[in-house]
Image (cartoon, rainbow, N blue to C red):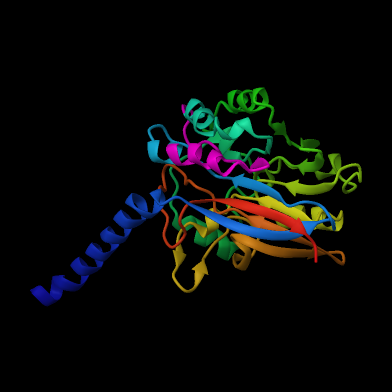
Amino acid sequence: MRARYGVPLGITAVGAAGLLYSAGFEARSFRLRRVTVPVLPAGMRPLRVLQVSDIHMVGGQRKKQRWLRSLAGLRPDFVINTGDNLSDPEGVPEVLDALGPLMEFPGAYVFGSNDYYGPKPRNPARYLLEKVQGRHGLNGNPPVVGAIHNPWEDLRDGFDAAGWLNLTNTRGTLKIEGLSVELTGLDDPHIKKDRYEQVAGGPSGAADFAMGVVHAPYLRVLDAYTADDYPLILAGHTHGGQVCIPFYGALVTNCDLDTDRVKGLSTHTAQGRTAYLHVSAGCGANRYTPFRFACPPEATLLTLVARD
């Protein structure tokens, strides 16, 4: 009798322990990653950029809110928010409160699909199935049927009131202590709201440095930015794979980016040009899949330095 039931009970116990760890501990083990990127023109002083992404705020996440507020102590030159701030229609005030200290610094933002639409319960195994089928999450279609409208307009108004640049399919320029940074942003490619034709043509040349910003790092967008000679692209969306296998890595990216570049700093090449790509693993998760494994939540402080 013990042999008959011992194995399945053991597997169940291990699975329960893993779920408890990934949802109760690792998903709340926030950390800061530091990266140095050699992309600035020769002679330009370093710039410190704080990237926050995929907050997926749910009401009552006090530890996450305190941690986000504490990031202001880094005193970055500017902040880039790469979207998916919400996972709860009631979460806007808590996002704005948590990011309040960071909004004292120059900044810019793009939105992700979860800023526009509330999440719905979904079997996590579908992400693996969609990878096999060559599909990616929403597969480019907005979740119109039964979708919950998130109050993204209130989030936008809060960011705009703080002076952050709205980079929704447009360009903007930040002035930072005598330097200018040109930012070219896109709306979320995951639901086909990106309109690169509206911003095509590459950096204007009027700023000291230029970079691209997008929520989901789909290859069509990375190709366009790189071919237009942007030296750096910032993105989020992937959650770093969210559930990874130790010593192996991520199984999915929830877009057509390969798993080798699911998070962190890498490069992308298109039409004979190469750009640096930084994909944030983000600091949250969908409210219906509130766990992480071998992929802790993060923000990143990127120090941009002159090219060799």
Taking depth in this image into account, of 102 and 60 the one nearest to the observer is: 102
**Residue located 68% across and 64% down the image:** 266
Q: Is residue 254 a member of the stretch shown in magenta? A: no
Q: Position of residue 89 (x, y in %)?
A: 49, 29
Percent position of residue 82, x then y: 63, 43
Q: Give the residue at x 82% y 53%.
A: 230
Residue with the most extreme left position: 1
Residue 160 in the image: above or below residue 81: above
Residue 88 within the segment the image draws in magenta: yes
Give the left or right position of residue 78, taking residue 21 as reference: right
Image location of residue 67, percent across then percent down? 45, 42
Rendered residue at 53%/53% (across/down): 239
Q: Specify the quadrant that holds the N terminus.
A: bottom left
Q: Position of residue 130 (x, y in %)?
A: 55, 59
Residue 72 in view: yes
Answer above or below: position of 207 versus 150. Answer: below
Quarter of the image for the C terminus: give it. bottom right
Where residue 79 sits, quadrant-wise, is top right
Residue 224 in the figure: left or right of residue 81: right
Q: Tell me if residue 195 can be seen.
A: no
* 223 and 109: which is toward the camera: 109
Q: Residue at x 68, y 42 (%)?
A: 77
Q: Which residues are magenta?
A: 66-90
